[in-house]
Structures are given as C-alpha cells and as structure tokens.
Image (cartoon, grey):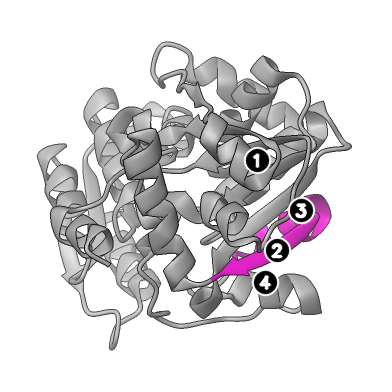
Amino acid sequence: MFDKVLKAKERLKGFSKLTPIVTSTTLDEIVQANIFLKCENYQRMGAFKFRGAFNAMSQLSEVEKSRGVITYSSGNHAQAVALVGKILGIKTTIIMPKNAPQIKRKATAGYGAEIIEYDPAFQQREEIALEIQNNKGYILIPPFDHQEIIAGQGTAALELFEEKKQLDYLLAPCGGGGLLSGSAIASKGIYPNCKVIGIEPEVADDAAKSFKTKVLHTVKNPPTIADGTRTASLGTITFPFVLEYVDAMITVSEKSIIEAVKFLFYRMKLVVEPSGALGIAALLSGAVKANGKVGVIISGGNIDAETMTFILNS
C-alpha cells in the first residue's frame, strides 16, 4: 500500500495544498516533548478529506465520470467529494444526516452537490446510497473504506515525514480509520520505528475495542462532540490495516476534547473542529505520554459557530 500513497502524492500535486506544520513552545513545555502539528484545517475545503476524494475520483474513467458519483458523509467527506466533483466536472450526490453541522452542509451545497437527507436514528446511509446507486448508476466513493481514499489520506503524514525526516510518535484521529490507516502506512513506509497511535472519543470507542479484541466492534450514533468520529465502525479494508500498521489505540473524554479545541484556539490561534483536536486532547490530558519528536495530524477546521460558542463557553 505504501506505493499507492507515493502515487497519490504525485496525483495531488497542483491540486491539494502543502499544509503547514505548526509548533508551540507552550505546548512543548506542557507535554515535555517536541510537538509538530500537521494542519489539515488549512487544506482545501478545510480538512484532509480532499486528499482521498481527489485521489480516488481523479482515477475514474471518462465513462464513470459521466455517470456521476454518490457518497454518504456527515460533512468533511461530503464537502471533499463535492469540491472534487466541481473541479473535475463530475455530478455529485451526497447522503447527509439531518443533524449534520450546518457549515458543512452549506459548503457541500455550495460546491454544487445534490444533498439527500436521512435520519440516522431510523435509516442506514449505506442502504440509501446503494438503492440510489442501483437506480441511477452512480459510482460510489465511500468515506474511508477504499484503498485509493486511504492512500490519499496517507499523503498528509507523508508530507510531515518528508519535512521532519523522523518522528518518535505519530497521533491521528480515528473515525472510520481511513486517515489513521493511511497515516500509519505512510509512517511505517518511511520510518518504521515511529509509534503510530490512533485517538478516538471514549463514547465512540469502537476502534479501540476492535483493536484490543481483534474483532470488529460497532458503536451506533455515539454522543460525541467530535462529529467526524461518529462512524459506527472501522471498515472491512481499514480494520486489517489498523491491526497491521497501528501500534496503539487510545480514547479521550469529551471534556478533554473541548479543552483541546480551546487550547488550540486561545494559545495557538488555530480554529480546529473537535475531531481534529483528538491528538492534542490525548497529549494535554495525559492519555498519551509521549517524548521526543511527536507528529499530530490536525484533521480539519470545519466547526460551526454554535459548536464553537458552546466549546468556548464551557
């Protein structure tokens, strides 16, 4: 898979942004390590998801592009597919939960996608997408369980390693496992000694349970503020990758996620959505005790005013 990450990097040239790596003396002093934040909140459409969506969709044949693309997402993958569709001239249809953050919904519509709402309490997004796909002939570009999506996501970690050469630890948030497995594949391909740690909310700990037991677990509609991690489980592709390439899975509390977003906002002047702050939450709370050089993937910055107001007032 590492060769796919390298090829994805070439495809993304001229389309994705080379996002900055940010440091903080204050953060380093607090956690007693050298922390390097790979800021995908500065990526196109505000999250790492652009990388995977472009890598996958740019490889479609002209016939497949003409048929159109469908996916399901609570926000960041939706925006990514919609934006890539606009860039490549592909019709896009997105299945979104009715409780998706408004900022993500508006951006998705703004890129020209057709949005179909569903109620996650009563409906399965995969089933809705499959029915529409069968009726319309659209090509499915899933949020994470797809080798080219995973390879594209891995390019963020690849860039981090290319600049910093080696890291002792790499922390990445985990929802469906696309970013985590892609990051781990890139990490082990460049510097095998780096310890890769996946971070997820305590109330959405399906991946941690799966990692520990080696059996796929599911947590349906977890009540976490980190909406990007509300995926029910790892995928049939990402689960084996996580088991093979990831060294540990750690969970963090909702309180620690909120404190991490506040720290990034007030101390580092970074706007980061809760899912993107999971690595910092793990470090600041002590859930991960790292030393040496530590890379952290800040996965996105698409947070709405209501959520940010709640966090800053907490």
Q: Which residue is mark 4?
A: 208
Q: CA distance from mark 4 to mark 2?
A: 5 Å
* Alpha-carbon span between mark 2 and mark 3: 8 Å
Amino acid carrying mark 2 in the image: Met
**Alpha carbon separation for disc pair 1 and 4:** 17 Å
Query: At which x and y percent is residue 168?
Result: 80, 37
Say which residue appears at 66% left-offset and 63% top-offset. Answer: 287
Q: Nearer the viewer, residue 42 or 81?
A: 42
**Image: magenta residue range:** 234-252
Q: Residue at x 22, y 79 (%)?
A: 119
166 relative position to 140: left or right: right
Position in image of residue 313 (x %, y %): 22, 63
Task: Say which amino acid is labelled 1.
Answer: Ser
Q: Is residue 227 visible?
A: yes
Q: What label does residue 249 carry, if any?
A: 2
Q: Amino acid at mark 4?
A: Ala
Residues at circles 2 and 3 in contact by the CB criterion of under 8 Å: yes
- Give the SS element for disc 1: helix
The image position of residue 87, as x and y in percent, is 26, 24
- Mark 3 — residue? 246
How far apart in space, not on screen, are marks 3 and 1 (Cα)?
9 Å
Check the picture and name the quadrant holding the C terminus. bottom left
Corner quadrant of residue 274 = bottom left
Residue furthest right in the image: 193
Q: Which residue is mark 1?
A: 183
